Amino acid sequence: MKTGATLLPVMMNMQEKQNSTLSKEIRAFFSEDRHAFGSAERLVGLLERFPQKTNGKVYYLIAGSWAVEFVSGKRLNHEDIDVILLDDVPRYLDDAVSSEEHCDGMMPLHLPYFLSSSSVLLCENVRGSGKVWVPNLYLQTCLKLLGELDVALSERALQQLETLFSCYREEDWSAVEKEMQFIYLQCLPSDLDTRALARDTVQAIREYRNGKKETAQASCRKIHHTINYSLRKAFALLQP
């Protein structure tokens, strides 16, 4: 079976021979810092030691549940800190302990995507440590639906998706659908109908906004299952 541009779980867990200096330094920080994994204290330490923006350039984004908190303004519980490094080949890494949760590898989206102003949001840090750069709503939504390979969509992921859905306003839904299709196209096997996935994702958002929470949850589970099934098949074909 042919695959699309890349496979998210494969790419995110492949070890790259050449890592940027910042990538090595952040991994070293995660291994040395004694604050709890995913804690606000650890995040503040990361942001203070490694400013996200220097000389007009953003070097990394805060992703995962912390990005959901920043974009929504709603306090959440956090199990880890997720980072997208804007290297020539973007990387995704985190400070998770378990091998099931830990990620450190290449991102399936190319650097020019992240350098476009529409792909990054500048948010106020609700914990009081200044401003934070995070992925936009569309990318955060798609990454939540792409994650958790080999398991059903967790209640925690569903809650975070609902928090993201509450941040959408009266959008140009055709434009949202178009960007989500682009994200899915870069991240998923080519046997998937990325246009239909993007359409269904937008529909789930609108269902939630219209008060149909259970319907939106069912839609998210279905989208995740469709993606998960295709990724597991493709991943199996890549095993030696």
Image (cartoon, rainbow, N blue to C red):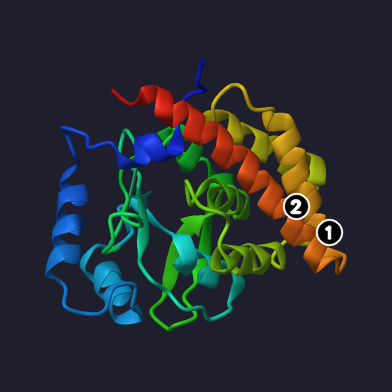
Residue at the spot 58% in from the left edge and 77% down from the top edge: 73
Judging by the rendered image, the residue that carries numbered circle 1 is 207
Q: Position of residue 226 (x, y in %)?
A: 64, 39
Viewer-nearest residue: 150 or 189 = 150
> Type of residue at label 2?
Ser
Residue 71 seen in the figure: yes
Distance of label 2 from label 1 (alpha carbons): 9 Å
Quarter of the figure that contains the C terminus: top left
Q: Residues within 10 Å of mark 2 (few under 14, many from 20)?
A: some
In the picture, the disc for residue 158 is none
- Count of numbered circles on the image: 2
> Type of residue at label 1?
Glu
Q: Are the residues at dot 2 and dot 1 in contact (C-beta closer than 8 Å)?
A: yes
Location of residue 185 with respect to 70 vertically, above or below: above
Instruction: Between label 2 and label 1, give the one nearer the viewer.
Output: 2
Residue at the spot 33% in from the left edge and 26% down from the top edge: 239
Location of residue 72 with respect to 26 vertically, above or below: below
Residue at the spot 36% in from the left edge and 41% down from the top edge: 12
Q: Position of residue 49 (x, y in %)?
A: 21, 68
Judging by the rendered image, the residue that carries numbered circle 2 is 219
Q: Position of residue 109 (x, y in %)?
A: 46, 35
Viewer-nearest residue: 38 or 73 = 38
Residue at the spot 77% in from the left edge and 40% down from the top edge: 199
Viewer-nearest residue: 173 or 235 = 235
Provide the secondary structure element on which disc 2 rests.
Answer: helix
Residue 187 seen in the figure: no
Q: Position of residue 147 (x, y in %)?
A: 50, 50
2 or 1: tag closer to the N-terminus: 1
Provide the secondary structure element on which disc 1 rests.
Answer: helix
